[in-house]
Amino acid sequence: MSSYFLPRDRVDELVARLLQSAEVIAPKRVETGDVFYSPVSSPAEVAWDYKTAVEPLKRFLFPQREPILQFSREEGKLKVEAVLEGKERIFLGVRGCDVTGVAVLDAMFGGEIEDPYYLAQRQRATFIALACLEADEHCFCVCGDAGPFLKNGYDQQWIPLAEGMLIEVGSEKGQALADAHQDLLSPAEPEQVAEKLQLAKKAEESFGEFRSYIAAAMRRLTMAETPDEVWEKLADNCVECGGCTFLCPTCSCFTVTSREEGDGGMLERQWDACLYPCYAREASGHNPRGEHPQRLRARFFHKLSHQWAQRNGRHACVGCGRCVVGCQAWAHMSAATEAIRRG
Ligand code: SF4
Ligand code: SF4
């Protein structure tokens, strides 16, 4: 695929053009200094200098709560309609771990059983990743094979060089976008590619001591070699708040509820968490994962076992570190992989 160079003084112009063609979701700083992926209305709102966003991209493609079916009764007949919403969106300046998180959701919602609600949003989305030049304190995307620079999985990847952006094209959609704005771009020069390689090396060196033992955990979970005590100890720590699952870019458990209004109503789906005691409870009252250690084991098996990796094309942790930041206990991904390795 092609690579281009966008001079620094033309970046805002290109962003302004993108804003005219679609809704642009980009990193935006709020008063507290935190950064959230949010709709922006001008190039000045894009926080290019951020490290990580508080929340992943999941809520734009798989909202926390969304209507899926609308029903009404007309002249005694029941009318049911699917609510399929999707709009043209460009996700600009989003981190590699989050773009890779979308690839995991794609496998979940676009695999053997297609989810039309997710796909309605996904098919109209364009992803412009922004390579990370320096790791944040809790990041471990190098262990999760999801950054800091991506090899694929994006429509475009932008790399901030000293004099502008190196733009790598990763898909036909990304190429079409580059073609539409050729007047602002020039083909990348060998020195610019060399500068990128230096930045990538520096970025990889910026990861501190923080690690996640994903390879060891994958093998041991797959071979069922983890003793029960590991899960019991993790369950002693975990308070089942669900924070890790809601912050995770790849967690996709949901439940469906109905709401009646007058002669009609709505079926909605909303995020759920496999760590919650009621998640797997069946109508008979039987709960195959009634005990907390079993639920933790199931969660990490789903994230890291070879069975799931084979099905989804990769394991389901991108090393974004959000569960580490959000967990009040010592039961997040990094703690769990360490416990599994030592177990
Ligand atoms: S398990 Fe934790 S580190 Fe891994 S993708 Fe989810 S939130 Fe990020
Ligand atoms: S692992 Fe941590 S964040 Fe997740 S449910 Fe348990 S206490 Fe909450």
Image (spheres, rainbow, N blue to C red):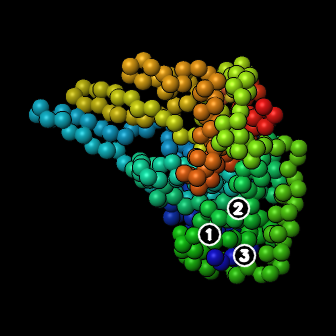
| Displayed quadrant of residue 223 | top right
Residue at mark 3: 5
Indicate yes or no: mark 3 CB to ligand 1 under 8 Å.
Answer: no
Q: Is residue 267 left or right of residue 240?
A: left
Discs 1, 2 touching: Cβ within 8 Å? yes
Is 238 or 231 nearer to us in this picture? 231
The mark that comes first in sequence, 1 or 2, is 2
Residue at mark 2: 150
Q: Is residue 126 visible?
A: yes
Circle 1 SS class: loop
Is 250 or 190 nearer to us in this picture? 250
Q: CA distance from mark 3 to mark 1?
A: 15 Å
How crowded pointer 1 is (Cα within 10 Å; few <14, some 14-19, many 20+) is rated as many
Circle 3 SS class: strand
Residue drawn at 77 percent across, 53 percent down:
142
Q: Look at the image and tell me in which quarter the N terminus lies.
A: bottom right
Q: Which mark is residue 170?
A: 1
Residue drawn at 61 percent across, 34 percent down:
299
Label 2 vs label 3, nearer the camera: 2
Q: Look at the image and tell me in which quarter the C terminus lies.
A: top right
| Displayed quadrant of residue 247 | top right
